[in-house]
Image (cartoon, rainbow, N blue to C red):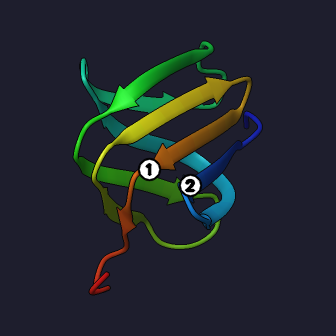
Amino acid sequence: MAAPLIVEIVELSEPVWNGEARQVIVRTTDGDLGILAGHVATAGVLVPGRVVIDPVDGQRIEGQIDGGFVSVDGNRVTIVADHYQAPGSDS
């Protein structure tokens, strides 16, 4: 099995989530981007939409962002969001 992705979601003001994942899906200005281990290095501008993370351990995490950017380098994925809203939260 390939090494897991190391994923971090950060709002402009604070970290939101980090951990190991098998897959990440975000929406960029060019469309949905699916990221697996070994993905080529890339960066993209995120548009409002969902973020999906399939953690190595645990259930799928789905949230909403208002925009931001994503960076993929090696097996590290960094999502910097203007605002991240987890399912069921009011903020």
The location of residue 17, given as percent across then percent down, is 60, 65
- Is disc 2 in contact with disc 1, using a CB cutoff of under 8 Å? yes
Image quarter where the C terminus lies is bottom left
Give the residue furthest to the front. Answer: 13
Tell me the kind of residue under disc 1: Ala
Q: Secondary structure at mark 2?
A: strand
Identify residue for label 2: 9
Disc 2 versus disc 1: nearer the observer: 1
Specify which label sits upstream in the sequence, 2 or 1. Answer: 2
Label 1 neighbourhood size at 10 Å, few (<14), some (14-19), many (20+)?
many
Image quarter where the N terminus lies is top right
Q: How many marks on residues?
A: 2
Corner quadrant of residue 60:
bottom left
Residue at 36% across, 52% down: 51
| Left or right placement of residue 87 versus residue 77 in this view | left
Q: CA distance from mark 2 to mark 1?
A: 7 Å
The location of residue 37, given as percent across then percent down, is 64, 31
Identify residue for label 1: 81
Q: Secondary structure at mark 1?
A: strand
Residue at 40% across, 52% down: 82
| Left or right placement of residue 43 versus residue 14 in this view | left
Residue at 37% across, 27% down: 45
| Left or right placement of residue 28 versus residue 75 in this view | left
